[in-house]
Image (cartoon, rainbow, N blue to C red):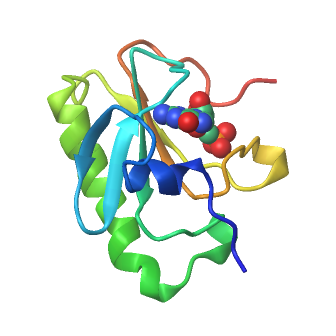
Amino acid sequence: MVEETIFSKIIRKEIPADILYQDDLVTAFADIAPQAPTHVLIIPNVLIPTVNDVTAEHEQALGRLFTVARKLASEAGIDESGYRLIMNCNRDSGQEVYHIHMHLLGGRCLGPLLAK
Ligand code: 5GP
């Protein structure tokens, strides 16, 4: 049995979040602790705990993460200056919420890919 996270409640609008986009497959909302001027989380509506749990049946929803990231980056005006898409998996990556999510970060120079 896979345990729901707070992100399922955000999808169902049971707790408040700044939702920027939602359709039948994905939901995008502002990160509660932004690390850059633009910091959006884009998540599949179906609960997939980590990238290790991804199967072929998730391909449509996971592809949608990218088309929504592109749209939101354009709307935020960071498509030309650039942005970073991050998806963490498990302990060593620092994953905190076990409902996979794509971070869309931009609006400033983001520096090197990895902190030491
Ligand atoms: P992770 O470290 O798992 O890749 O990222 C989890 C992200 O979720 C963090 O950037 C954190 O700030 C964000 N987050 C955690 N709880 C909430 C919440 O209740 N609402 C929102 N909007 N973001 C959250």
Q: Is residue 16 left or right of residue 67?
A: right
Q: Quadrant of the C terminus?
A: top right
Q: Nearer the viewer, residue 87 or 5?
A: 5
- Residue 99 at x, y = what percent? 59, 58
In the image, what residue occupies the spot 19% across and 43% down? 71
Position of 98 compared to 13: left or right?
A: right
Q: Residue extending furthest bottom?
A: 57
Q: Residue at x 25, y 34 (%)?
A: 73
Image height of 45 relative to 112, above or below: below
Q: Name which residue lies at 18% across and 22% down.
A: 77
User: Which residue is at 41% across, 12% downward?
Assistant: 108
Residue 46: x, y in percent?
Answer: 46, 71
Quadrant of residue 111 within the rendered picture: top right
Residue 95 appears at what percent x and percent y?
A: 72, 46
Quadrant housing the N terminus: bottom right
Horizontal side of residue 88 vs 82, given as left or right: right
Establish if 84 lies above or below 93.
above
Ligand 1 occupies quarter: top right
The quadrant where residue 72 appears = top left
